[in-house]
Amino acid sequence: MSVVGRVDLTVLGQKLTVRSAESPEYLQSLARFVEDRAIALQQSGVRDPMSALALAAIEIADELHRARDETTRDARDVGARLDALVSLLDSVTPHDR
């Protein structure tokens, strides 16, 4: 079982304390990822830091959902191909019963 610890993070100057079993390095990398996305939005004209963070969160959530949908589609495709392969093998395999 992982030990839950406290990690201090800073995103766009906002200090956050997070309790997690994840490593501080991992959590800091996530915070940097979000901050980088928010900074990119600010550089494209979004002035309010909270709006930039909210838009970054929406963009990241969109990417997550699209990746999940693609994974689900891929899994269904693999399943269909395996079913077709099993049917093909069944059709060419002698059935001695």
Image (tube, grey):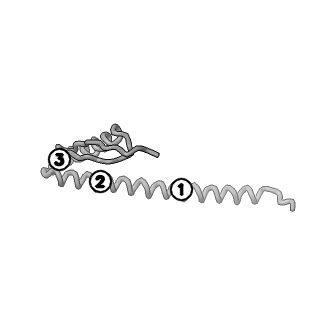
Q: Name the residue beneath numbered marker 2.
A: 59
Residue 94 is drawn in which quadrant? bottom right
Tell me which residue sits at (27%, 41%) in the image: 32
Q: Residue at x 37, y 46 (%)?
A: 4
Residue behind mark 1: 75
Residue 60 x, y percent position in the rendering? 32, 52
Amino acid type assigned to the residue bearing label 1 in the image: Ala
Separation of marks 2 and 1 at Cα, in angstroms: 24 Å
Instruction: Find numbered disc 3 in the image and state the secondary structure of the residue it sits on.
Output: helix
Given the image, on which type of amino acid does mark 3 rest? Gln
Residue positioned most to the bottom: 97
**SS for callout 2:** helix
Crowd rating for badge 3 (residues with CA inside 10 Å; few <14, some 14–19, many 20+): some
Residue 13 point in image, percent of width and height = 17, 43
Q: Are marks 2 and 1 in contact (CB under 8 Å)?
A: no
Q: Quadrant of residue 96?
A: bottom right
- Residue receiving disc 3: 42
Please tell me whether mark 1 sits on a helix, a strand or a loop.
Answer: helix
Of the numbered discs 2 and 1, the one sitting upstream in the chain is 2
**Image location (x, y in percent) of residue 80:** 60, 59
The answer for how far apart the CA atoms under marks 3 and 1 are is 37 Å
Q: Residues within 10 Å of mark 1 (few under 14, many from 20)?
A: few
